[in-house]
Image (tube, rainbow, N blue to C red):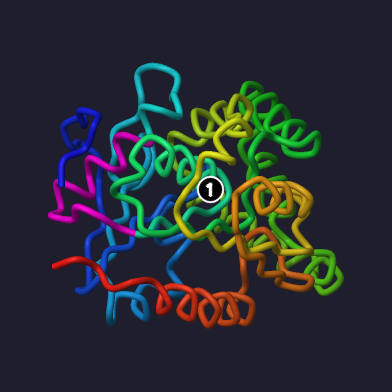
Amino acid sequence: MNSDRSLPSPHLDVVVKGSGPALLLAHGAGGGIEGNFGLVLDDLAGDHTLVGPHYPGAGGSPVATEPLELDALADQLVGEAVAAGQESFAVLGESLGSAVAVRIAVRHPERVRALVLTAGFPVADPVLALAARIVKSLADAGRWDDVARFAHLSCLSPADLEGVQPTDLDTQTARTLAGMPPGMLDHFDLVSRVDVRADLGKVSAPTLVAVPTGDRLVLPDSSYRLAAGIPGARLLELPGAAHILNEADRSTWLHHVREFLGALPPTPA
């Protein structure tokens, strides 16, 4: 299969595991492959080939020297998949990765078999835009502990918050701080500039949109707008789920995603 666009040379840190039809993973801002998909990597790798590139400044990928651009990032992820031997694939996008996935589907439609978009957005809603500004402001002031605290709390659902104890919050915040990648601010800068609204109607791949209805970072309405704008998109609501899915919600997600992927036409030999 030949793409109608030239692809950049591979240079990102990429997780490749499993065998079978390919799944290209697009993670969220300030996240990574393990952070976003860790609960389901082993399961999906049992019958799929997973290709999980880390964005610049995440995992072992070098930090960007210029502001990230959505087209370039989309092409880079496709280039990494092709370099890993995968000519076509479904794309699983989470949060910012959903916008990346949509742009991949529009720029490389001949390669994309399906999309699964979780906690995604076509453009930053007011809450997400404000969150990006707060993260930048705190980081510019050197208040990285507060960045971690804000990021962690934003990714909890209302139900999660009811059970949080102060000592637990301190422990969880420290874990969040330790896991924040060097490129986090670059990722959130891209979040503030993303706009794929004009792309939605051009998506031809079968699409499943998963909506965590307890998401406090990306408002559920943003995911509903993705589903409404993409022709034929299926909607999966995860009642009360947070921006980062917990084990129970991820298990529900996995069941429906497997059902969706299993209904796709076989991958051409």
Res 131 → quadrant = top right
Q: Give percent across and percent down for residue 236.
A: 66, 69
Q: Give percent across and percent down for residue 117.
A: 55, 56
Quarter of the figure with the C terminus = bottom left
Within the magenta stretch, is there residue 75? Answer: yes
Dominant SS type (magenta): helix
Q: Which amino acid is tagged 1?
A: Ser
As drawn, is 210 to the left or to the right of 100? right
Within the magenta stretch, is there residue 80? Answer: yes
SS at mark 1? helix
**10 Å crowding of disc 1: few (<14), some (14-19), many (20+):** many
Q: Residue at x 42, y 50 (%)?
A: 26
As drawn, is 62 to the left or to the right of 2? right
Q: Residue at x 34, y 78 (%)?
A: 42
Quickly name the residue at label 1: 98
Q: Give percent across and percent down for residue 176.
A: 57, 54
Residue stretch in magenta: 74-89
Q: Give percent across and percent down for residue 157.
A: 77, 64
Is the residue 192 above or below the residue 153 in the image?
Answer: above
